[in-house]
Image (tube, rainbow, N blue to C red):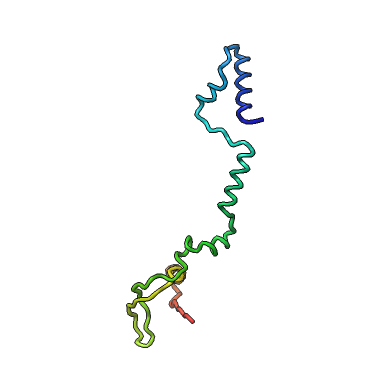
Amino acid sequence: MSWRRQCLNKMSLRSESSKKPSVDKDQFLRNQKFSVPYESEQRATVAKLAAEKYQRLTPLKHILYRPDSYIGSAFLSDEQPVYVYDAMRKQVRKKEARIVPGLLKIFDEILVNAADNKRRDPQMTTIAVNID
């Protein structure tokens, strides 16, 4: 039985039990400010359209398919000024380079976590970074 039919039946029972004159049911429903739920066929159609538009991903697949949500862009950026370590001169210098912002963010997160650990553990004396 549809939701609308249930409402109409309840109204009929109320009007019969109270011995008041029956209210025009269609007029009553037009005056109400509520949304009528979809019928079963309409619900199935909406669910099918949603399934075509969206896909359910596991947490791991979501990270792999949409890294921008977590680390930023996974593609090379345009040239921009960055600070790099020059091993020949043994100094840090500024130069134009193309970088992957997501990779930089991962590296930054590791260093920040190491620095936080240093604050918690006073016996820690060194943060070593080796890149092959």
> Where does residue 48 sit, x and y in percent of width and height?
61, 47
User: Is 18 in front, or is 57?
Assistant: 57
Q: Residue at x 67, y 30 (%)?
A: 1
Count of residue discs = 0
Q: Residue at x 56, y 18 (%)?
A: 24
94 lies above or below 1? below
> Can residue 41 be seen here?
yes
User: Is 38 in front, or is 89?
Assistant: 38
93 sits left or right of 38 in the view: left
> Where does residue 90 sit, x and y in percent of width and height?
36, 85
> Where does residue 98 sit, x and y in percent of width and height?
40, 74
Q: Residue 84 appears in which quarter of the rendering? A: bottom left
> Can residue 114 be seen here?
no
Q: Residue at x 51, y 26 (%)?
A: 32
User: Is 130 in front, or is 31?
Assistant: 31
Among all residues in the image, which is located at the extreme bottom? 88
Q: Residue at x 64, y 38 (%)?
A: 40
4 lies above or below 55? above
> Where does residue 21 sit, x and y in percent of width and height?
57, 12
5 sits left or right of 89 in the view: right
65 lies above or below 43? below
132 lies above or below 112? below
3 sits left or right of 73 in the view: right
